[in-house]
Amino acid sequence: MTDIKTMLVIGATGVIGRRVIQHLDAAADWRAIGVSRRKPDYPGEAAHVSADLMDKADCKAKLGALDGVTHLLYAAYSDRPSWAEQCAPNALMLENVLDGIEAGPAKLERIVLMQGTN
């Protein structure tokens, strides 16, 4: 029997997030849960959670309720006009996600942080 791992993909509608979810959908030993503000516009088997990563309470309520998550792929990104303006909101989103997950029953084995710009 194969142990099923569950990856929470933060930024499910982005370039990286959508590709990872599509890959995991084809893998027999993985389950994916996508997180983004809007529902993905591509077909797939992954569950989806709509969450505002800038909202700490929303992240705690929605991400803290998830059970069985073993892996986290963080690929969210909020663009701003300058590099200096990008730091605070992107750090806040990551902090809110991690605080939300820590508030719940998930037992993470691995966190992968993917960052880039358009």
Image (cartoon, rainbow, N blue to C red):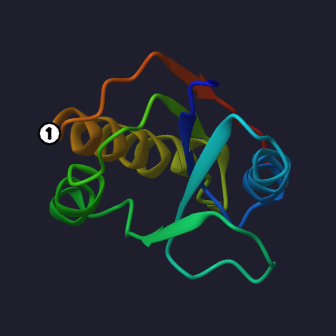
Q: Residue furthest top?
A: 109
- Residue 69 placement: quadrant: top left
Q: Is residue 42 above or below residue 78?
A: below
Q: Please provide percent x and percent y for residue 32.
A: 61, 50
- Name the residue at 21% across, 32% down: 102
Q: Is residue 118 above or below residue 20?
A: below
Left or right? Give the position of 30 relative to 97.
right
- Name the residue at 27% across, 57% down: 59
Circle 1 packing at 10 Å, graded few (<14), some (14-19), many (20+), is some
- Residue 81 placement: quadrant: bottom right
Number of marks in the image? 1
Q: Is residue 52 above or below residue 63?
A: below
- Choose between 2 and 89: the one closer to the eye: 2
Q: Which residue is mark 1?
A: 103
The amino acid marked with disc number 1 is Ala
In the structure shown, which secondary structural element does the residue marked by tag 1 occupy?
loop
Left or right? Give the position of 15 relative to 34.
right
- Name the residue at 76% across, 45% down: 24
- The quarter of the image holding the C terminus is bottom right
Left or right? Give the position of 1 relative to 69.
right
- The quarter of the image holding the N terminus is top right
- Choose between 26 and 50: the one closer to the eye: 26
Q: Please provide percent x and percent y for residue 77.
A: 62, 53
- Choose between 3 and 35: the one closer to the eye: 3
- Name the residue at 74% across, 53% down: 21
